[in-house]
Image (tube, grey):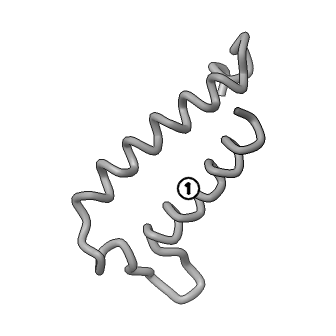
Amino acid sequence: MKQFIEAPDFLQLVILKTDENSVEARRLAAELSEEQLNWTSSPEKWSIAQCLDHLAVTCERFDKYYT
């Protein structure tokens, strides 16, 4: 968190880290089956696929408004 607080260009750092996290998420998800991606421990919990979709939508909106 300190890295972000002390960043001279906060938004550029957020964009960079978002891109890095997207690459890492793709790498990790590529190793999982569709069943693994969609598994949930209960109906109230999100699957990995739902979490990744949520992050992708959020990142897309962030990019749209701040780049």
Q: Which residue lies furthest to the bottom in this view?
A: 43
Q: Is mark 1 on a helix, strand or loop?
A: helix
Q: Which residue sits at x=29%, y=76%?
A: 34
Quadrant of residue 20 within the rendered picture: top left
Instruction: Describe residue 34's horizontal placement relative to residue 62 as left or right.
Output: left
Instruction: Describe residue 55's horizontal placement relative to residue 6 as left or right.
Output: left
How many callouts does the rendering have?
A: 1
Q: Please, is residue 37 above or below residue 1 in the view? A: below
Q: Which residue sits at x=62%, y=59%?
A: 57
Quadrant of residue 54 within the rendered picture: bottom right
Q: Where is residue 12 in the image (x, y as percent from the top left)?
A: 65, 23
Quadrant of residue 58 within the rendered picture: bottom right
Q: Which residue sits at x=37%, y=43%?
A: 24
Assign the N terminus to one quadrant of the image.
Answer: top right
Task: Name the residue that disc number 1 marks.
Answer: 56
Assign the C terminus to one quadrant of the image.
Answer: top right
Q: Where is residue 56 in the image (x, y as percent from the top left)?
A: 55, 56
60 or 41, which lies in front? 60
Instruction: Describe residue 62's horizontal placement relative to residue 28 as left or right.
Output: right
Instruction: Describe residue 38's horizontal placement relative to residue 60 as left or right.
Output: left
Q: Where is residue 29 in the image (x, y as percent from the top left)?
A: 32, 58
Q: Residues within 10 Å of mark 1 (few under 14, many from 20)?
A: some
Q: Which residue sits at x=74%, y=21%?
A: 5
Q: Please, is residue 27 above or below residue 39 in the view? A: above
Q: Where is residue 33 in the image (x, y as percent from the top left)?
A: 24, 72
Q: What residue type is labelled 1?
A: Ala
Q: Please, is residue 33 above or below residue 10 in the view? A: below
Q: Which residue lies furthest to the right in this view?
A: 65
